[in-house]
């Protein structure tokens, strides 16, 4: 992972994919009986279908980062190093950043399709709880001074929280109907609806956003590492 | 077998200590009593106590149970001095310790929530129609909370013994269980059970089981200093 984060190829190909998906996503018209590339023109969604290229991949990026954070927390418990703790914390932080962006893009979209910024939807509640959990994680980190102790407490909380959170977001939407496309009879981009044109842009967008989030996380990790090294040297002087 | 024996012995010790320090349990009882009275007076002076909706009743009830459980479980770690923890550390494996703590906390929380029920019935009336469902949901909910918060209190105690930290860390994680329990609990106020009642009971039990399992796996790492 360490080496992978320093390589350039995935960063630049991620940016290219993202540019392709976002520029193309704004350029392709909706289907109105014309020839050529077109996005499906669904009732209610209309032009807002393009949000699929922002909102959904941002959530994917968040889940990937939180999962990486979870993995590093497990590996920290088996063999604690400062670097692993740094990885776990930075992935969680940037995961929360992308989660917040996902919420924001979702809110703007919801205002135009559902008529309100926030609705009592199981997926929205799941998102909000996820943010609360990881903000609590940051508060826990901030409240402990000792480095080893902080790493250990944060890792155990992270594992505990992640498993409960994943169980929650998989179970809760099955308990109640959701307003999200594809649930409870809403128009959706489900298997037969997510047509090939949308797919051409959706998959690159997903990969692109994940690559971008990893890039941001890798910069944060390096900055934290430098900070730690400087602090250690300062104490020696 | 050895594990079970150790757990039971340590549980008995904990319960004995609990009864010896009567003021601690009395303080929790006082906490329950005064919060229920707070609810009672606020409803009374709004003039809504007479025709209190079951939904409002159960919301107040679960909030009080939640806070009582947090207080009860947090005490189980904050009361231990550093020296005593070290003594326990040498005396028994970490899993025995946490399992016994979890079970004792579940018993105490269950006792407190049943008591809260009795006080609620006494001064706010009993709107429930199905007493079995009521106590089923109450048991699953309280036990689940105490599983979750015992582990969270262990983290908070390690981080510097701060009740508000325990609340911050625990409440977001308690929401999943709370949503299902409130759903289950609501069934006690209806004449008939809904179709997916069994399903919800299993999900709620699952959310009890996950924190228990995770606590057993993770606590040994947490305990080492």
Image: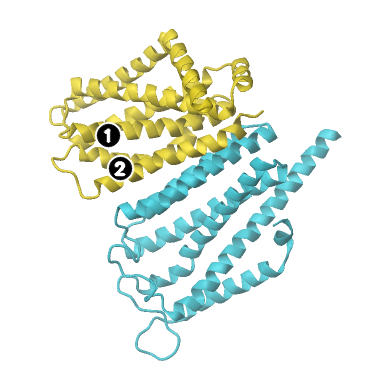
Chain colours: A cyan, B yellow
Which chain letter goes with mark 2?
B
When the figure is inspected, residue B29 is found, relative to residue A102, above or below; the finding is above
Give yes or no for contact between labels 2 and 1 (Cβ–Cβ under 8 Å): yes
| Residue A118 visible (yes or no) | no
| Residue A42 visible (yes or no) | yes
Q: Is residue B102 left or right of residue B197?
A: right
Q: Which mark is drawn over residue A1?
A: none
Q: Which mark is drawn over residue B136?
A: 1
Mark 2 vs mark 1: tell me if same chain.
yes
Q: Where does residue B32 sit, x and y in percent of width and height?
A: 32, 20
Which chain letter goes with mark 1?
B
Name the residue at 47% across, 76% down.
A199
Image quadrant where one finds the C terminus of chain B: top right
Q: Is residue B180 left or right of residue A37?
A: left
**Hey, which residue is sitting farthest front in the picture?**
B1
Q: Where does residue A184 sit, x and y in percent of width and height?
A: 28, 62
Q: Where does residue B166 sit, x and y in percent of width and height?
A: 49, 30
Q: Quadrant of residue A186?
A: bottom left
Q: Is residue A230 left or right of residue B134?
A: right
Mark positioned earlier in the residue sequence (2 or 1)? 1
- Pick whichever, B114 or A15, lies toward us: B114
Name the residue at 52% across, 78% down.
A24
Q: Where does residue B174 sit, x and y in percent of width and height?
A: 41, 38
When the figure is inspected, residue A15 is found, relative to residue A223, above or below; the finding is below
Name the residue at 42% across, 83% down.
A38
Residue that mark 2 sits on: B201
């Amino acid at each position: 992972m360490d080496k992978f984060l320093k390589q350039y190829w995935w960063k630049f190909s991620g940016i290219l994919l993202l540019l392709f998906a976002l520029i193309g996503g704004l350029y392709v018209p909706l289907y109105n009986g014309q020839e050529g590339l077109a996005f499906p023109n669904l009732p209610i969604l209309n032009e807002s279908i393009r949000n699929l290229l922002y909102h959904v991949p941002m959530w994917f990026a968040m889940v990937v980062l939180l999962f990486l954070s979870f993995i590093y927390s497990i590996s920290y418990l088996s063999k604690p190093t400062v670097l692993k703790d740094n990885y776990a914390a930075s992935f969680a932080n940037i995961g929360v950043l992308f989660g917040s962006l996902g919420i924001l893009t979702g809110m703007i979209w919801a205002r135009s399709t559902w008529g309100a910024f926030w609705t009592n939807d199981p997926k929205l509640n799941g998102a909000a709880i996820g943010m609360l959990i990881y903000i609590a994680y940051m508060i826990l980190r901030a409240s402990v001074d000792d480095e080893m102790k902080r790493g250990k407490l944060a890792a155990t909380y992270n594992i505990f929280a992640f498993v409960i959170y994943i169980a929650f977001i998989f179970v809760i939407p099955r308990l109640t109907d959701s307003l999200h496309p594809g649930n409870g009879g809403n128009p959706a981009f489900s298997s037969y609806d997510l047509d090939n044109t949308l797919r051409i842009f959706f998959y690159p967008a997903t990969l692109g956003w994940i690559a971008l989030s990893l890039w941001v996380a890798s910069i944060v990790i390096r900055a934290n590492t430098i900070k730690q090294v400087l602090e250690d040297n300062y104490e020696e002087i | 077998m050895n594990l079970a024996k150790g757990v039971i012995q340590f549980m008995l010790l904990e319960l004995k200590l609990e009864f010896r320090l009567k003021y601690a349990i009395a303080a929790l009882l006082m906490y329950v009593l005064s919060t229920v009275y707070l609810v009672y007076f606020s409803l009374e002076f709004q003039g809504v106590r007479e025709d209190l909706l079951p939904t409002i009743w159960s919301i107040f009830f679960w909030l009080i149970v939640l806070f009582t459980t947090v207080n009860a479980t947090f005490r189980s770690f904050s009361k231990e001095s550093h020296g005593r923890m070290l003594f326990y550390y040498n005396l028994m494996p970490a899993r025995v310790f946490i399992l016994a703590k979890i079970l004792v906390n579940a018993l105490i929380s269950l006792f407190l929530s049943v008591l809260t029920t009795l006080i609620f019935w006494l001064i706010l009336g009993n709107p429930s129609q199905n007493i079995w469902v009521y106590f089923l949901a109450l048991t699953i909910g309280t036990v689940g909370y105490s599983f979750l918060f015992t582990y969270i209190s262990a983290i908070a105690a390690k981080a510097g013994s701060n009740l508000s930290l325990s609340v911050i860390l625990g409440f977001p994680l308690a929401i999943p269980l709370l949503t299902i329990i409130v759903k289950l609990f609501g069934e006690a106020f209806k004449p008939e059970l809904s179709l997916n009642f069994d399903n919800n009971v299993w999900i709620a039990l699952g959310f009890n089981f996950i924190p228990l399992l995770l606590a057993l796996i993770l606590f040994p790492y947490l305990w080492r200093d």
